């Protein structure tokens, strides 16, 4: 009887782990993310403190929304009022639907990323470049 318990428990644990991570950001490919970031680079730098039309995305993962020092005066009221920290999950939701996530923000439709794999990849690239 013991011989059957281990595989069943192991399978149940695997199913539970998959369910727990469903819908969350997955590990992406930074090299593929570099290509995706070209879309973002129209408005954003990955250099610390360098702003373009949008704020620098260097270190964005873990940063409170609307607080990039070199861009602070140019944030929309929406971004200034968001009370959240940019986690991979929050950024992913924002990239999928910027207007739905933060109505009144200034990111254009060009900034929207409709593919979850592309989002995971670009987040891996931003994370890698922010070290």
Image (spheres, helix red, strand yellow):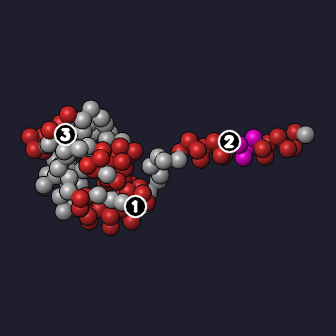
Q: CA distance from mark 3 to mark 2?
A: 41 Å
Locate the N terminus and report the quarter of the image it occupies: top right
Q: Which mark is residue 78?
A: 3
- Could you tell me which residue is drawn at 63 percent across and 42 percent down? 16
Q: Secondary structure at mark 2?
A: helix
**Mark 1 or 3, nearer chain start:** 3
Say which quarter of the image contains residue 120.
bottom left
Label placed on residue 115: 1
Pointer 3: residues within 10 angstroms few (<14), some, or many (20+)? some
Q: Nearer the viewer, mark 3 or mark 2?
A: 3
Q: Left or right: where does residue 115 sit relative to residue 1?
A: left
Q: Earlier in the sequence, mark 1 or mark 2?
A: 2
Distance, label 1 to label 3, CA atoms, is 25 Å
Q: Gap in Å between the C-alphas at discs 1 and 2?
A: 29 Å
Between disc 1 and disc 2, the foreground one is 1
- Residue 15, x across and y down, in percent: 65, 46
Picture coordinates of residue 57 (x, y %)?
24, 50
- Name which quarter of the figure residue 20 lies in: top right
The reply, left or right, for residue 59 in relation to residue 89 is left
Alpha-carbon neighbours of circle 1 within 10 Å: few (<14), some, or many (≥20)? few
Q: Which residues lie in the magenta part?
A: 9-13
The label shown at residue 13 is 2
């Amino acid at each position: 009887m013991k011989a059957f318990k281990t595989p069943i428990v192991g399978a149940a644990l695997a199913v539970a782990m998959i369910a727990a991570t469903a819908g969350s950001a997955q590990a992406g490919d930074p090299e593929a993310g570099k290509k995706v970031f070209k879309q973002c680079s129209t408005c954003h730098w990955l250099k610390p403190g360098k702003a373009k039309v949008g704020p620098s995305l260097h270190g964005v993962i873990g940063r409170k929304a609307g607080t990039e020092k070199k861009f602070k005066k140019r944030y929309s009221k929406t971004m200034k009022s968001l009370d959240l920290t940019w986690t991979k999950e929050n950024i992913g939701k924002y990239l999928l639907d910027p207007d739905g996530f933060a109505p009144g923000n200034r990111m254009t439709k060009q900034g929207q990323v409709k593919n979850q794999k592309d989002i995971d990849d670009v987040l891996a690239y931003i994370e890698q470049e922010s070290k």
